[in-house]
Image (cartoon, grey):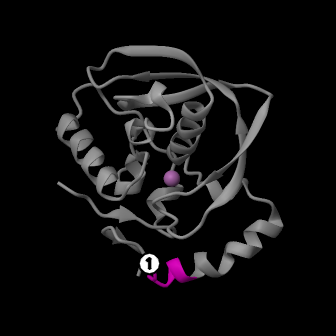
Amino acid sequence: MILPIYIYGQPVLRKVAEDIPLDYPNLKELIANMFETMDRADGVGLAAPQVGLPIRVVTIDLDVLSEDMPEFKGFRKAYINAHILETSDDQVSMDEGCLSLPGIHETVKRANKIRVKYLDENLEAHEEEVEGYLARVMQHEFDHLEGKMFIDHLSALRKQMVKGKLNAMLKGKAHCSYKTKTVR
Ligand code: NI
């Protein structure tokens, strides 16, 4: 089932999301719905707060990029109760967008390497070091679990530049091809 994507201004996007219990009802269905929603919207990542749920669940699909990055062939994973444990000092800049911020693309500086812990779809615990593009996507998605969005990383000047678009979103004007839920 395709879920509406919550747009900037929705309070759930600013909440710190909670870990879920291992018997969380219909978790498999939620994950399947998040993948379907993300596929339809052409996203590579989606965090549960973006579909209105303040819980620590993230889906990432990098298979769509595998033509350019063959190491991601078949990469389609869910991360449950995900947390970043450590970030490296070396940072890289890259362009980012977000399904909850349609029409905004800005350069964001993030750590090149991170250490994370999470449960996979079978609720098995993992702790791993990740770097490069996957570390970038994870930091973007896991930020959502802390109530943060990529625009929070912009300079005051860049923030000023996107203000008009943000205000339009607050007025319910989100121009995109997927189903959304704006504040008004
Ligand atoms: Ni996002």
Question: As shown in the figure, which amino acid type bears the numbered disc 1?
Answer: His
Q: Residue at x 60, y 78 (%)?
A: 165
Looking at the picture, how far across and down is residue 30, in whole percent?
A: 23, 43
Q: Could you say which is closer to the camera, residue 139 or residue 20?
A: 139
Span shown in magenta = 168-174
Looking at the picture, how far across and down is residue 133, in whole percent?
A: 58, 34
Q: Residue at x 34, y 23 (%)?
A: 120
Looking at the picture, how far across and down is residue 170, in whole percent?
A: 52, 79
Q: Tag 1, which secondary structure?
A: loop
Instruction: Name the quadrant of the N terminus.
Output: bottom left
> In the rendered view, does 84 fall on the left or right side of 118?
right
Res 58 visible: no
State the residue position of label 1.
175
Above or below 77: residue 123: above
Q: Residue at x 38, y 29 (%)?
A: 75
Q: Reply yes or no: does residue 101 show up in magenta.
A: no
Above or below 11: residue 163: below
